[in-house]
Amino acid sequence: MATQEGTTVGRTMTLLIIFVIVVIAVVVIFGYFNGLFKFVSPVEGSVMASGVFALPGGGGSTGNLIVQVRDTGHVSITGVAVACPTTQFASSDCGGLQINVNGSELSARNALSYGQTGSGSGSVQSAPGTTFTPGAAVTVTVTVSFSDGSTIPEALILPAQAG
């Protein structure tokens, strides 16, 4: 037969254990939502960028730059800036090259989601006093902006292809 004292101690221990479990649960939930703990892989934006640099004829002062961007993460791509070095190109914005999705310019309202590809092309000029030569590599920086505010720069090294 259980004594009154034993029953009271048992109930107190049970309440204490429940209290400790609740406190631990609250701390873990609070920490998780404040970024202190990560139980799953964080959701991040990722991208696969590629391009082609085509030269009409055998080279010269003009070329055609084509850039493709594919969303490979789980955060939508809302913008892409393409930058060309002024040591190789006449314009640092690559002649105003813009990325399009389904025929419209990429934007927050017309974003790329997981698995989608956007592309853009434009005619570019070589830097003053220089020419583009087939086989010579040009560097283009593609900076991708995501809906969460993060950005990823990708450097593309593209060999000039005679076409």
Image (cartoon, rainbow, N blue to C red):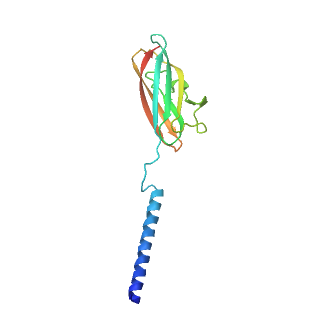
Tell me the quadrant of the picture where the N terminus can be found: bottom left
In the foreground, 58 or 103: 103
Give percent across and percent down for residue 127: 46, 19
Please give the name of the residue rendered at 61% of the width and 30% of the height, measured from the top-left corner: 104
Please give the name of the residue rendered at 50% of the width and 28% of the height, measured from the top-left corner: 68
Give percent across and percent down for residue 72: 47, 37
Please give the name of the residue rendered at 42% of the width and 28% of the height, measured from the top-left corner: 156
Image quadrant assignment for residue 10: bottom left
In the foreground, 6 or 124: 6
Give percent across and percent down for residue 131: 44, 14
Tally of numbered tags:
0
Please give the name of the residue rendered at 59% of the width and 30% of the height, measured from the top-left corner: 102
> Residue 110: in sight, yes or no?
yes
In the foreground, 82 or 41: 41
> Residue 127: in sight, yes or no?
no
Image quadrant assignment for residue 7: bottom left
Q: List the single residue furthest toward the top.
A: 57
In the foreground, 118 or 4: 4
Vertical comparison of 105 with 60: above or below: below
- Decide if residue 14 is on the left or right side of residue 81: left
Vertical comparison of 56 with 7: above or below: above
